[in-house]
Image (tube, helix red, strand yellow):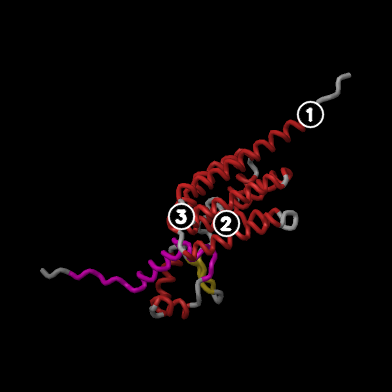
Amino acid sequence: MKATPLQQRRLSDDIVERIETLILEGSLRPGERLPAERALAEDFGVSRPSLREAIQKLVARGLLISRHGGGTFVSDSLGSSFRDPMLELLENNPEAQRDLIEFRHMLEGACAYYAALRATDLDRQRLKAAFERVQDCYLQQGRVSRSEEGRADALFHLAIAEASHNAVLLHTIRSLFDLLEHNVVTNIGGMLPLGSVVRDRLLAQHEALYRAIVDGRADDARRKASEHLDYVQEVLVDTLDEAKRIERAKRRREPA
C-alpha cells in the first residue's frame, strides 16, 4: 500500500513563527502596532493573503489583536502577571519593597552578566544612550522630578535586560517594569535627604556597571549590579532606622 505523503507545511505557519520570534525576542513589544500589511508582507517576502492567514492564527491564540480600521497590535496583556491589582499590593507593602530589592539582586545580576557576554554594537549604543540619560538626571539634581529620574534609571536596567538576549529575563523585567520604576522612585525619595555624597556614589556605581558590560567583563558586571543594590538597601535601612530614632526621641517627655 502506497504511503500517504505528509501534509505540506503552509507558508502562513512560517510567518507565524517569524512573528512569534519577534515577540519573544522583544523586537515587537506588548501594545506595539505591527507595520502596515503591505510593508510587512514586503519585509517578509510573502503574499498579503498568506500574511493575513498568519495574523488570523495569532489573533486566535491571543498574541495579536486586530482593531477594525486601526491596525494589528501585539496584545498588551502579555507579561501582565505583576500589573494591577497585584502591583498596588506590592507597592504599598514595606516588606514587599524589601523582597523586590532581593529579587532584583538575582534578576539584574543575571541580566548584567549575559549582557556583558552577548551585547552587540547596537546594544552598546542603546546602553550608552540609556546611561547618559541617567547621568543627565543625576547632574541636574533639583531640576528634574523624582519620576523622571526613576524612569531613566528603570529604562537603563531595561536596556541591560535587552542586551542580555535572554527572552525569559527580558520579559520578566518588562512585566515588572512599572513595579521596578516605582521602586526606584521610592528609593530615590528615601535617599534624597542624604545629599550629594550618596548621589555621587550611586552615579559612580551606574557608570561602573555600564563600563563592565560594554567592556565584556561578565563576572564583574554581575558583581557591580549586586554591589549597587547592596548599597541601595544599606542606605535605605540606615535612613529608616534614623527616622525611627527621631520619632522615638520626639515621643519621650522631659523629666518633671
Residue situated in front as seen by the camera: 17 or 142: 142
The residue labelled by disc 1 is 249
Q: Residue at x 56, y 61 (%)?
A: 128
- First along the sequence among labels 3 and 1: 3
User: Quick one: which residue is furthest to the left in this view?
Assistant: 1
Question: The C terminus is located in which quarter?
Answer: top right
Residue 136 visible? The answer is yes
**Marks 2/3: CA–CA distance:** 17 Å
The residue labelled by disc 3 is 216
In the rendered view, would you say 191 is above or below 251?
below
Q: Nearer the viewer, mark 3 or mark 1?
A: 3
Looking at the image, residue 248 sits to the left or right of residue 97; the answer is right
The span picked out in magenta is 4-33
Residue situated in front as seen by the camera: 5 or 110: 110
The residue labelled by disc 2 is 156
- First along the sequence among labels 2 and 3: 2
Q: Quadrant of residue 76?
A: bottom right
User: Quick one: which residue is furthest to the right in this view?
Assistant: 256
Q: Secondary structure at mark 3?
A: loop
Q: Residues within 10 Å of mark 1 (few under 14, many from 20)?
A: few
**Marks 3/1: CA–CA distance:** 50 Å
- Residue type marked 2: Phe
Q: Position of residue 163 (x, y in %)?
A: 48, 58
Q: Residue at x 53, y 64 (%)?
A: 125
- First along the sequence among labels 1 and 2: 2
Q: Are marks 3 and 1 in contact (CB under 8 Å)?
A: no
Q: Position of residue 245 (x, y in %)?
A: 74, 31
Question: The N terminus is located in which quarter?
Answer: bottom left
